Image: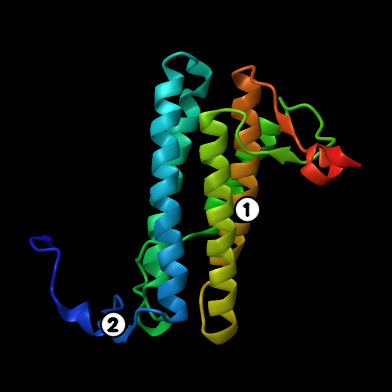
Amino acid sequence: MAINRVYTRRGDDGTTSLAGGQRVPKDGLRIHAYGNVDELNSFVGAARVTAAEQAQAEPRLTPLVSMLLRIQHELFNLGSILATLPEDVHPKQARITEADIQQLETEMDRMNEDLPQLRSFVLPGSSRLNAALDICRTICRRAERACVALWREDTIPPETVRYLNRLSDWLFVSSRWVTHITGTPETLWEPNRSASGSAS
């Protein structure tokens, strides 16, 4: 199917179409859920560009670029399922599976092997790539919350929530991993460095 024209004017009344053709309000739970996933995909793309740039100086970051691209495809699959009512899902429609979740866990375990033990909360911003991945993590958590809210009201595959839950962990681990690989010190949370803590 060719996408020749982006605008249709049909959404000017505050509704949009699901994959099955149903018109629904743009602020509905299902739209909110896959809208958050779409936003997450955009930020993962931005993180992938940053990773590719930094991989030119640090080749050990190269595998991260392909992993982020794979995750973007998985997020598009996830969004496709969320945009489709259960009765309209085609048997061959792309979706999130246990294999996708297991892959995230395998990669996390591999990255964690290189990391020092965590003894404090970590602040985002040790590097540009670290910050980009942490932004993805927080958006992923929001997408997960939106899917949980939808799950309470409607039917969605349970793998959807499990994948987002695991992906947020993956993004946290990978943000620490890139800091370690590039030799950048982690920025640890120091409660007493707040204005009130400094004054006491």
Depth check: give the residue in front, 27 or 93.
Answer: 27
- The percent coordinates of residue 149 (x first, y second) are 58, 77
Q: Which residue is mark 2?
A: 14
Question: Which residue reaches farthest front?
Answer: 199
Q: Which residue is mark 1?
A: 166
Residue under the point 43% across and 30% down: 50
Q: Secondary structure at mark 1?
A: helix
Badge 1 amino acid: Arg
Residue under the point 66% across and 23% down: 180
Badge 2 amino acid: Gly
Taking 88 as reference, is 82 above or below it? above
Q: Is residue 171 visible?
A: yes
Quadrant in which the N terminus appears: bottom left
Taking 43 as reference, is 16 above or below it? below
Checking the image for residue 4, the label placed there is: none
- The percent coordinates of residue 89 (x first, y second) are 37, 76
Marks 2 and 1 in Cβ contact (< 8 Å): no
Q: Secondary structure at mark 2?
A: loop
